Image (spheres, rainbow, N blue to C red):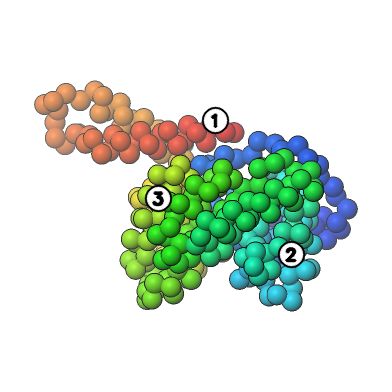
Amino acid sequence: MAWRVCFRILILMHSGHEKTDMKTPRPFLAPALRRAWLFVPGVDASSHATALASGADAIVADLEEMTAPEDRPMARERIVAMLRETERLGLIGAVRINKLENDGQADLEGIMPGAPRAVFLPHTETTDQLVALDAALSEFERIHGIGHGTTEIVPTIESAKGLVALGALLNVSPRIRCCMLAVEDLAANLGARRTPEGRELFYARSLFLIECIAADCVAIDLPCTYRSTGVLAAELDLAAQLGFTSKCVVFAEHVDAVNRALAPSSDAAASARATLAAYDAQGPYADASAWVDAPERNNAKRLLARYEAFQGDL
């Protein structure tokens, strides 16, 4: 069945004939409820088809690292087709462009006819970069009849300079509702030796999350660039423990694990309700073996609130 879905998507994307009305914005998954952001090469239509069938909440076609400069003109055309299909399926369709001073302006000219829901800006370090992108998006929205200010900007933090400037960066534009932390370029900039345990980036992840929460911005956690499911499981456990609710993904087979880790199940919700009931029922002299501590109660409250937010969005 899955191969038929992928095959149909491939046909639609290559045909270029299916039209979608991009003029009227529709409510899509709220930023706080977007779990997996799956990155795919901009020029690879088969990867687009796989991503569309993966279960990811958001699909990001990459014109920067994953697309060679000579392939970018063709990639932009294929990305427009992909964006129209994400819109039809009710997914978040996004694009990572190049910096504006590089190929970024040409990227916008090529992809904005597809009305992406979000544009990722790589190597964000200064407010000027975001001001310029905001202005460019406003102009393209005017040209293509897209609602003004409806295209989100997602700054990508890939250096120490970007990380320490994050508080100022996130307040540049109301378009900024999410922000992403990169991993390999950040580690290289820090001179950190990469390990599966990821201890070398623990402080960076924590600081990034704190700055995003302070700015009322959804923090998209760095991707697990190790393919191992064991490494992914440990990384997701830490991400959830720290408080991340959204994560970048670079392997399609990671999507399901990310979605399950970042959205409570009905069984988890039932367990949380039982914990809250037990906490409320216990007296000051309750048996220590059945005692529910305040941290457990608080964890249960947070889990239940997130579960109910997902139920309300269905």
Say above or below: 214 vs 238. above
Residue 23 at x, y = what percent?
A: 78, 40
Residue at 42% of width from left, 33% of height from top?
Answer: 305
Helix, strand or loop under label 1: helix
**Left or right position of 249 against 215:** right
Q: Nearer the viewer, mark 1 or mark 2?
A: 2
What secondary structure is found at the residue carrying circle 3?
helix
Q: Tell which of 78 and 286 is nearer to you.
A: 78
In the displayed structure image, the side of residue 123 where residue 60 appears, left or right: right
How many marks the image carries: the answer is 3
Q: CA distance from mark 3 to mark 2?
A: 32 Å
The residue closer to the viewer here, 273 or 143, is 143
Q: Earlier in the sequence, mark 1 or mark 3?
A: 3
Q: In the image, residue 81 lies at what x, y percent? A: 78, 56
Say which residue label 1 marks.
312
Identify the image quadrant of residue 205: bottom left
Question: Mark 2: few, some, or many residues within 10 Å (few <14, many ≥20)?
Answer: some
Q: CA distance from mark 1 to mark 3?
A: 27 Å
Mark earlier in primary sequence (1, 2):
2
Quarter of the image where the C terminus is located: top right
Q: Residue at the spot x=69%, y=48% of the render?
A: 138
Where is mark 2, residue-wise? 106
Q: CA distance from mark 1 to mark 2?
A: 40 Å
Q: Disc 2 residue type?
A: Ala
Q: Earlier in the sequence, mark 3 or mark 2?
A: 2
**What's under tag 3, amino acid-wise?**
Glu
Q: Which amino acid lies under the numbered mark 1 shown in the image of this protein? A: Gly
- The residue tagged with tag 2: helix, strand or loop? helix
Q: Residue 44 location in percent, x, y? A: 72, 67
Is residue 153 shown to the viewer in this render?
Answer: yes
Residue where numbered disc 3 is placed:
211
